[in-house]
């Protein structure tokens, strides 16, 4: 029996009044359970817009988006987000909450018991390379930027979602944090999580992801990472200096 897509875009368009042309223009694609995908494209190509429409941080002006066969326009946005892990630019940690409280926000909304929440917080802190004993009671202001990024990831996966969205998780982090984030993403992938990550890093895209969603002049190409990451194709988007 053929798999049904977990995420489906059907002729989706998003228009911002401040832009010349559409942010995304009639794009359609299907993403299947467990796929490990990076979204590439030049600045202004609609990468972040596409990601944010999946969990209804913004809504399309035309077309439809489906998750597990259900049109997300008919779903309550808050309820939808409880089941999608995401780390999106400009959405940070709650400064008045300690690290453990930040990670446990969605599990509490899902009415997990305190023992299950505590165990999950410690599991995730271990996964992202931060000692639970040392970090669970710290405040975000006591963390470095790289440590905060690891907590973003832990919080995004706290409720064990089947879909994980990340926007530029490797931006401005050191190599140690980059490796921990990649190792964590691969661990989530082993658990069958459908993962979409926006990045500008072509080497990471080539070496770590199975498929690429390539946005170019508000058009879309989607396929195997090794096939799309040929020099000619990438030069159309990033220019000749993109060779790696």
Image: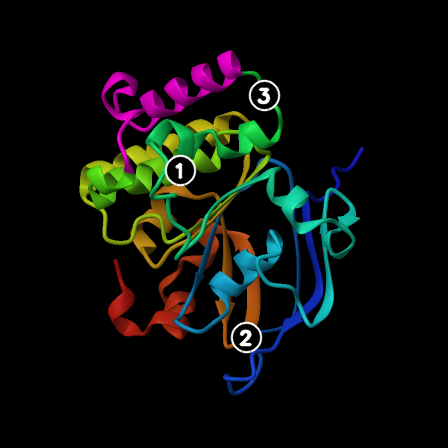
Determine whether the residue tagged by mark 1 lies in a helix, strand or loop.
helix
Residue 50 image offset from top left, x and y in percent: 55, 61
Above or below, 73 relative to 127: below
Disc sitting over residue 112 in the figure: 3
Residue that lies at the very extreme toward the front in this rendered image? 96
Q: Visible in this render: residue 178?
A: no
Task: Between residue 217 and residue 181, name the one nearer to us.
Answer: 181
The tag earlier along the polypeptide, 2 or 3, is: 2
For the rendered model, the colour scheme is rainbow
Instruction: Determine the image quadrant of residue 43.
Output: bottom left
Marks 1 & 2, CB-CB < 8 Å contact: no
Q: Visible in this render: residue 106?
A: yes
Query: Seen in the image, is 172 located left or right of residue 234?
Result: left
The range drawn in magenta is: 114-139
Residue shown at 67% from the left, 42% from the top: 79
Determine whether the residue tagged by mark 3 lies in a helix, strand or loop.
loop
User: Which residue was labeled with disc 1?
Assistant: 153
Question: In which quadrant of the rendered image does the N terminus lie?
Answer: top right
Q: CA distance from mark 1 to mark 3?
A: 19 Å
- Prevailing secondary structure of the magenta residues: helix
Q: CA distance from mark 2 to mark 3?
A: 39 Å
Task: Between residue 176 and residue 242, name the one nearer to us.
Answer: 176
Above or below, 82 relative to 89: above
Circle 1: is it few (<14), some (14-19), or many (20+) Cα within 10 Å?
A: many
Circle 2: is it few (<14), some (14-19), or many (20+) Cα within 10 Å?
A: many
Determine whether the residue tagged by mark 2 lies in a helix, strand or loop.
loop
234 magenta-colored = no
Residue shown at 48% from the left, 62% from the top: 48
- Single out the mark in the foreground, 1 or 3: 3
Query: Seen in the image, is 201 located left or right of residue 48?
Result: left
């Amino acid at each position: 029996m053929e798999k049904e897509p977990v995420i489906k875009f059907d002729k989706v368009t998003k228009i911002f009044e401040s832009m010349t042309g559409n942010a995304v223009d009639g794009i359609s694609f299907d993403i299947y359970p467990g796929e490990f995908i990076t979204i590439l494209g030049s600045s202004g190509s609609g990468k972040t817009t596409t990601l944010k429409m999946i969990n209804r941080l913004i809504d399309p002006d035309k077309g439809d988006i489906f998750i597990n066969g259900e049109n997300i326009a008919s779903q309550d946005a808050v309820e939808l987000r409880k089941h999608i892990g995401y780390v999106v630019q400009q959405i940070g940690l709650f400064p008045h909450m300690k690290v453990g409280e930040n990670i446990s926000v969605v599990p509490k909304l899902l009415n997990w018991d305190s023992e299950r929440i505590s165990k999950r917080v410690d599991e995730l802190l271990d996964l992202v390379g931060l000692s639970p004993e040392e970090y669970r009671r710290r405040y975000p202001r006591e963390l470095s930027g790289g440590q905060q990024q690891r907590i973003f990831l832990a919080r995004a996966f706290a409720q064990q979602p089947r879909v994980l969205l990340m926007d530029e998780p490797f931006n401005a982090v050191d190599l140690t944090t980059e490796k921990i984030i990649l190792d964590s993403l691969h661990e989530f992938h082993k658990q069958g999580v459908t993962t979409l990550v926006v990045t500008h890093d072509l080497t990471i895209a080539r070496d770590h992801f199975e498929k690429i969603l390539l946005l170019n002049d508000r058009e879309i190409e989607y396929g195997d990472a090794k096939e799309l990451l040929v020099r000619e194709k990438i030069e159309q988007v990033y220019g000749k200096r993109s060779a790696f």
